[in-house]
């Protein structure tokens, strides 16, 4: 367990200062993207690894089969129907309705998703790319319901995790497993290729307990119009379109966001954020109190042992 005193004493130099009163600007990234020296053919080909390093994300088709996806969907629906879970702090509802927008800490809430987080196709690949043992910094289900699922503003996850959680460097990545089809109509994630190699300094300072409103609508830690336009001019925008069972891998610093979903079709994904053990969080760089444990693993940091996932009809085996 990491104590508050230890966190403060371990605070490293802030090489990615943001929300400190400086004007919005773009600076160069100083950390590697891929920490592995060579590709591991059992996990990722050399070409795919080079593409990930270059653009900051990959969309991998058919990583999980139909039976596995059915297993995940059953758990997705079970959690959504659980009134006790819906009333918990981990469940974030839409701004204008009581429908779940995001459900956090699912690797602890759900035995099924706890097993999935350790699946070698995910955790093993994360270990390889980060060249370190990994743990779950954050996990969540994004439901993005039909008709009323609101947008996620443009942002770099690392900027938030660095400023508000105390993640020292860019040695983390996210994996999003697609559970319902993500297409050009229902608010698929949009990413800016190459944006992960630059860091956008955001304006203003972080309010206390910012997370209480930012999870519904983020207004701090978003790029200025000028910075965003510059990134798009350089890299363009790509939509992460994929079928159920596909996986989107993206670097912690890639700029991304999504539009509202006004279609009848939900856009549901499960997210795991893998952080290197050597990059565990310290004290938030904004100087404010840490966010809750369900948003940032701080006390319960356990290295994952990658293993195969087994989809079973009887989910009681995961209890």
Image (spheres, helix red, strand yellow):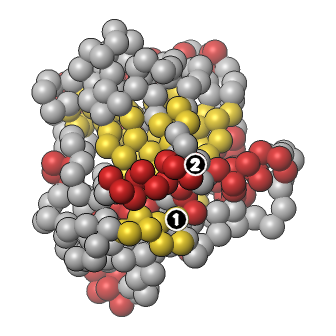
Report x, y in % for residue 189. 46, 34
Q: Is residue 95 left or right of residue 255?
A: left
User: In the image shown, does 199 or 164 lie closer to the viewer?
Assistant: 199
Report x, y in % for residue 106. 39, 40
Q: Residue at x 17, y 58 (%)?
A: 210
Q: Is residue 231 left or right of residue 99?
A: right
User: In the image shown, does 116 or 234 lie closer to the viewer?
Assistant: 234
Asked if residue 57 can be seen in this view, the reply is: yes
Q: Residues within 10 Å of mark 2 (few under 14, many from 20)?
A: some
- Secondary structure state at the residue bearing disc 2: helix
Q: CA distance from mark 2 to mark 1?
A: 12 Å
Pair 2/1: label in front: 2
**Vertical order, 181 against 50 (above or below):** above
Q: Is residue 18 left or right of residue 289?
A: right
Question: Which residue is label 1 attached to?
Answer: 198
Residue lying farthest bottom? 9
> Which quarter shows the N terminus?
bottom left
Report x, y in % for residue 42. 84, 45
Is tag 2's residue or tag 1's residue first in the polypeptide sequence? 1
**Vertical order, 19 against 113 (above or below):** below
Q: Residue at x 49, y 54 (%)?
A: 231
Name the image quarter holding residue 141: top left
**Badge count:** 2
């Amino acid at each position: 367990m990491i104590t508050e005193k230890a966190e403060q004493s371990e605070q490293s130099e802030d090489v990615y200062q943001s929300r400190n009163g400086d004007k919005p600007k773009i600076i160069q990234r100083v950390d590697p993207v891929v920490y592995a020296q060579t590709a591991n053919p059992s996990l990722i080909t050399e070409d795919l690894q080079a593409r990930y390093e270059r653009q900051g994300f990959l969309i991998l088709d058919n990583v999980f089969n139909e039976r596995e996806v059915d297993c995940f969907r059953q758990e997705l629906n079970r959690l959504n129907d659980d009134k006790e879970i819906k009333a918990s702090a981990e469940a974030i509802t839409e701004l204008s309705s009581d429908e779940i927008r995001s459900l956090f800490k699912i690797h602890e809430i759900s035995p099924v998703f706890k097993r999935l987080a350790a699946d070698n196709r995910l955790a093993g690949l994360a270990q390889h790319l980060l060249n370190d043992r990994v743990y779950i910094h954050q996990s969540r289900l994004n439901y993005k319901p039909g008709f009323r699922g609101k947008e996620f503003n443009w942002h770099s996850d690392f900027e938030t995790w660095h400023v508000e959680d105390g993640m020292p460097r860019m040695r983390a990545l996210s994996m999003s497993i697609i559970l319902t089809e993500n297409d050009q109509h229902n608010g698929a994630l949009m990413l800016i290729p190459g944006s992960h190699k630059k860091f956008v300094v955001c304006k203003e300072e972080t309010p206390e307990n910012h997370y209480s409103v930012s999870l519904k609508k983020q207004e701090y830690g978003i790029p200025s119009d000028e910075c965003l336009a510059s990134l798009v001019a350089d890299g363009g925008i790509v939509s992460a379109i994929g079928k159920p069972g596909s996986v989107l891998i993206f670097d912690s610093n890639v700029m991304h966001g999504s539009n509202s979903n006004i279609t009848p079709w939900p856009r549901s994904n499960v997210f795991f954020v893998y952080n290197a053990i050597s990059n565990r969080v310290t004290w938030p760089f904004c100087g404010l109190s840490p966010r809750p444990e369900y948003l940032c693993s701080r006390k319960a940091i356990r290295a994952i042992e990658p293993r195969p996932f087994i989809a079973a009809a009887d989910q009681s085996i995961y209890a």
